[in-house]
Image (cartoon, rainbow, N blue to C red):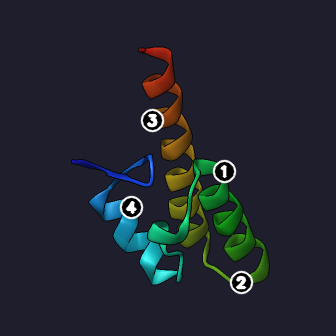
Amino acid sequence: MLKNINGILISEDDINILKKYNIDILKCHSIREVQLLIERIIGNTDLLDDEVDILDNISINLQEIHYYKDTNK
């Protein structure tokens, strides 16, 4: 189920994964801000390929949700 946090639609699972990497969605005010934080984590941390894939998927999911939300107005 999607939650609306500061205008960002995101799943509870994705929120929990982001918390694991110290990304607090409550402090973010846009999808782009979340994506930049994800990019910073990926670029500055030695992550396993699976972890990078998970974070990339969250970023892609956020963009897709945003696109469809704005397209279906």
Kindly report the distance in space between the C-alpha atoms of the residues bearing marks 4 and 3: 13 Å
- Marked residue nearer the N-terminal end (4 or 2): 4
* Mark 1 closeness class: few <14, some 14–19, many ≥20 residues within 10 Å: few
> Which residue in the structure is indicated by mark 4?
14
Question: What amino acid type is highlighted by mark number 1?
Answer: Arg
- Label 2 sits on a secondary structure element that is loop
- Where in the figure is residue 12, as x and y percent of width and height? 28, 61
**Residue 13 drawn above or below residue 9:** below
Q: From the image, tell me which residue sits under label 2.
A: 45
Residue at left 61%, top 66%? 52
**Residue appearing at x 49%, y 75% in the figure:** 24
Using the image as rendered, state which of residue 8 and residue 43 is in the foreground: 8
- The residue at the point 77 percent across, 81 percent down is 44
Label 4, label 2: how many angstroms apart (C-alpha)? 19 Å
Determine the CA span between mark 4 and mark 1: 15 Å
The spot of residue 51 in percent (x, y) is 54, 71
Q: Position of residue 36 (x, y in %)?
A: 71, 61
What kind of residue is marked 4? Asp
Residue corresponding to mark 3: 65
Q: Which residue is mark 1?
A: 32
Q: Tell me the element at label 1.
A: helix
Quarter of the rendering containing residue 6: bottom left
